[in-house]
């Protein structure tokens, strides 16, 4: 997360589908961290921790068995890292869990790669547990969790292959405009207000952007926008 501020999210965070508790799997190779997160997050309203994994391979196996709504995924793990585990989870299921990367350092190259692989967002281990819980609830509800300043710093340090997706995508001028506003963390209703169009129109544009970019989700599209240079440092909408 960035400084003392929290994430920008694209919609209200509640509980899981139909108001049920969000089921969560925690994947981290450090047993103390994993146990602490389990204890703290299990005490948060609307979250049910259903399992743990000590590495990416175990995380994939546990997801197959437990089918959690969300995986809180460390990226630097033995046997199978969190990037490859995220990619595998998204590829092998028609309804994969949402993945939230949890990391010690926001400028970790592994985090950027995990977002490019389809993770829905990231949180820092040092943030208050209520913020980590909020990130879990937000992605479980199908929304994105964005940290515009942190993403900008990460991708500015090392462009990735997905940067090539933007010039090949043939976005319309309006779609590029919507993508720029997405990158600032605005929700669809906020983008609609900014552009003086209906939320339904924005939703259509966002869907077109994701399809044309081949983006796994909204966060992945924003990573591509930063990597490609469509969004530059200092852009605020």
Image (cartoon, rainbow, N blue to C red):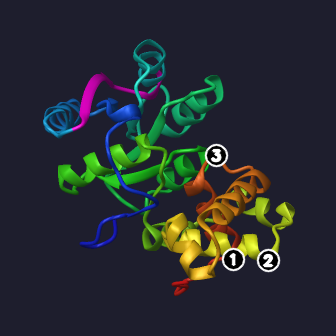
Residue labelled with disc 1: 177
The quadrant the N terminus occupies is bottom left
Residue labelled with disc 2: 173
Range shown magenta = 46-57
Residue labelled with disc 3: 216
* Side (left or right) of 226 relative to 175: left
Q: Are marks 3 and 1 in contact (CB under 8 Å)?
A: no
Looking at the image, residue 113 lies above or below residue 94: below
Q: Nearer the viewer, mark 2 or mark 3?
A: 2
Which quadrant holds residue 188? Answer: bottom right
Residue at left offset 65%, top offset 69% = 179
Q: Is residue 230 magenta?
A: no
Residue at left offset 19%, top offset 49% = 129
- Which one is earlier in the sequence, the residue at label 2 or at label 3? 2
* Side (left or right) of 78 relative to 89: left
Q: Estimate the spatial distance between the alpha carbons at disc 3 and disc 1, rounded to whole Å.
A: 20 Å
Q: Where in the figure is residue 56, as x and y percent of width and height?
A: 45, 28
Q: Estimate the spatial distance between the alpha carbons at disc 1 and disc 2, rounded to whole Å.
A: 6 Å
Looking at the image, residue 234 lies above or below residue 211: below
Q: Where in the figure is residue 109, as x and y percent of width and height?
A: 50, 56
Q: Where in the figure is residue 28, as x and y percent of width and height?
A: 32, 34
The quadrant the C terminus occupies is bottom right
Looking at the image, residue 115 lies above or below residue 64: below
Residue at left offset 53%, top offset 35% = 86
* Side (left or right) of 15 relative to 107: left
Looking at the image, residue 31 lies above or below residue 213: above
Q: Which residue is at the far bottom?
A: 234
Numbered marks: total = 3
Q: Nearer the viewer, residue 142 or 192?
A: 192
Q: Are marks 1 and 2 in contact (CB under 8 Å)?
A: yes
């Amino acid at each position: 997360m960035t400084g003392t501020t929290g994430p920008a999210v694209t919609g209200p965070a509640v509980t899981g589908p139909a108001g049920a508790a969000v089921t969560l799997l925690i994947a981290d190779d450090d047993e103390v961290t994993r146990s602490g997160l389990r204890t703290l997050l299990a005490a948060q309203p609307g979250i049910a921790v259903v399992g743990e994994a000590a590495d990416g391979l175990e995380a994939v196996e546990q997801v197959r068995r437990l089918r959690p709504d969300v995986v809180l995924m460390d990226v630097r793990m033995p046997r199978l890292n969190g990037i490859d585990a995220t990619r595998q989870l998204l590829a092998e299921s028609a309804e994969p869990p949402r993945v939230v990367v949890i990391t010690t350092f926001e400028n970790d190259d592994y985090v950027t790669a995990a977002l490019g692989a389809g993770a829905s967002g990231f949180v820092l281990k040092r943030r208050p547990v209520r913020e980590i819980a909020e990130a879990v609830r937000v992605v479980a509800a199908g929304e994105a969790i964005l940290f515009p300043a942190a993403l900008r710093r990460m991708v500015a340090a090392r462009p990735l292959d997905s940067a090539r997706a933007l010039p090949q995508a043939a976005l319309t001028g309006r779609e590029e405009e919507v993508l720029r506003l997405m990158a600032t963390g605005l929700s669809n209703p906020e983008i609609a207000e900014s552009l003086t169009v209906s939320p339904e129109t924005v939703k259509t544009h966002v869907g077109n952007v994701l399809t044309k970019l081949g983006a796994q989700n909204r966060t992945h599209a924003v990573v591509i926008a930063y990597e490609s240079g469509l969004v530059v440092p200092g852009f605020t909408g």
